[in-house]
Amino acid sequence: MRLPLPQRIKARLARAVQARVDDAVRPVVAREDDLARRLDELTARIDRLAAAIDLKNVSERVDRLDQVAHAGEERLRRLDEQSTWNAHQISRLAPQAAALEQRLERQARPVVVQTDGQDLPEARSLVEVVREEHARVRARLSTLSAYEERIRRLEDSTFAPPAG
């Protein structure tokens, strides 16, 4: 069945218009498809970058926390060494402090001497002997102090915490 002439012209005209519209729209549709594909690629890339940035931040924070923990461990190690050294020094000085406390306690108690006049010359000679002995003891203590200082330096070099 053949269509009447105006209908055939209409159909042919519609096909020509459709072909021209399709030719004009095809690049736009292709461009739209290309842009949609590129948008999807860029969205995926942005998502990957966002995840990488978050991982980088987490990694940086973990590294910083590791550094802080390492510094804390090092400080704790040094404090442990120093406390060991201090304990040694305290144990070394404790007997000397106890002896000094005893001497001070004895000095704090007043001594009352009662005498008659006959013992006075003998007492003065005894005081002179005591003063001489005191001078000798002071000289010995000075020498002893020098030796103790040398021993202390040797102990310090042996038990001293490492520098740093």
Image: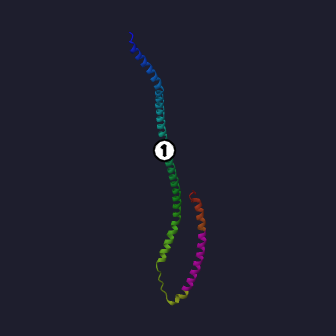
Q: Position of residue 88 (x, y in %)?
A: 53, 61
| Residue at x-position 57% and y-position 81% | 131
Residue 8 lies, in percent from the top left, at 40, 14
Residue 11 drawn above or below residue 53: above
51 drawn magenta: no
Q: Quadrant of the N terminus?
A: top left
For this orientation, the residue located farthest to the front is 6
In the rendered image, the vertical position of residue 122 relative to residue 16, given as above or below: below
Residue drawn at x 47%, y 31% is 35
Residue 50 is situated, as x and y percent measured from the top left of the image, at 47, 40
Secondary structure beneath disc 1? helix
- Placement of 3 over or under 80, stated as above or below: above
Q: Is residue 142 magenta?
A: yes
Q: Which residue is mark 1?
A: 57
**Left/right of residue 14 with respect to residue 81 in the rendered view:** left
- Judging depth in this view, the residue of 63 and 14 nearest the camera is 14
Residue lying at 49% horizontally and 74% vertically, measured from the top left: 104
User: Depth check: 112 or 71 in front?
Assistant: 71
Q: Percent from the top left, x then y, of residue 134? A: 57, 78
How was the colour assigned to the protein in this rendering?
rainbow
Q: Which residues are magenta?
A: 123-146
Amino acid at circle 1: Asn
Q: Residue furthest top?
A: 1
The quadrant in which residue 130 appears is bottom right
